[in-house]
Image: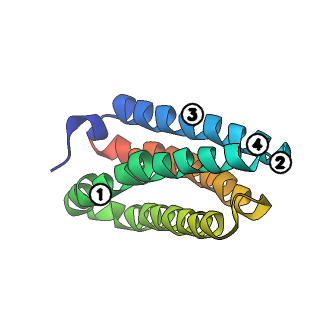
Amino acid sequence: MTGPALQRLDSHHAIHEAALGEAEELTDGLRAAVRNNDAVLAANIAQWLMEHWEGRILRHADEEEAGLYLDLARARPGLAEVVVQLRRDHDLMRRILAEAKLMTDARGVDGDALRRFEALLLIDAIHSRDEEERLLPAAR
Ligand SMILES: [Fe+2]
Ligand SMILES: [Fe+2]
């Protein structure tokens, strides 16, 4: 069963905006630390950023898959394809984050790891917009 905060477009949009905004700020800090060759600061920010992606954004994705997506796909069979696409976005984010983690653990934050964190921002922004435009209007 889905909670009302995820069913309502305005509150769900606010959750997306707040989480993405924080991820953008942390990624800006990470980019600056990498540019300044500050490996210690970069490692610390990368740690916060990974916790943020895991604990906020991907946890939100897990909740959607366990509730909202199931409820909507059941209630509106016409949305099944959209739900498949949105799940795929979540999967890509999980996989890219796992890659960033492996890279960071193995050799600190370099350009390859930074590109993963930047890719996550782009995918999440597109994903959230599609969710808000294609899925949530049907949730009411
Ligand atoms: Fe989502
Ligand atoms: Fe969402």
**Quadrant housing residue 119:** bottom right
Q: Which mark is residue 37?
A: 2
Labels 3 & 1 near each other (Cβ < 8 A): no
Q: Amino acid at mark 1?
A: Tyr
The Cα atoms of the two marked residues, 2 and 3, are separated by 24 Å
Describe the element under mark 1 as helix, strand or loop.
helix
The Cα atoms of the two marked residues, 1 and 4, are separated by 38 Å
Residue 87 place in picture, x, y as percent: 42, 64
| Residue reaching furthest to the right | 36
**Quadrant housing residue 36:** top right
The Cα atoms of the two marked residues, 4 and 2, are separated by 6 Å
The earlier-in-sequence mark between 1 and 2 is 2
| Residue reaching furthest to the front | 40
Q: Circle 2: is it few (<14), some (14-19), or many (20+) Cα within 10 Å?
A: few
The residue labelled by disc 1 is 69
The earlier-in-sequence mark between 3 and 1 is 3
The residue labelled by disc 4 is 33
**Quadrant housing residue 84:** bottom left
- Please identify, in this view, whether the residue under mark 1 or under mark 4 is nearer the observer: 4
Q: Circle 3: is it few (<14), some (14-19), or many (20+) Cα within 10 Å?
A: few
Labels 2 & 3 near each other (Cβ < 8 A): no
Q: Amino acid at mark 2?
A: Asn
Q: Circle 4: is it few (<14), some (14-19), or many (20+) Cα within 10 Å?
A: some
Q: Amino acid at mark 4?
A: Ala
The Cα atoms of the two marked residues, 4 and 3, are separated by 19 Å
Residue 45 place in picture, x, y as percent: 61, 44
Residue depicted at 55% across the width and 35% down the height: 22
The Cα atoms of the two marked residues, 1 and 2, are separated by 43 Å
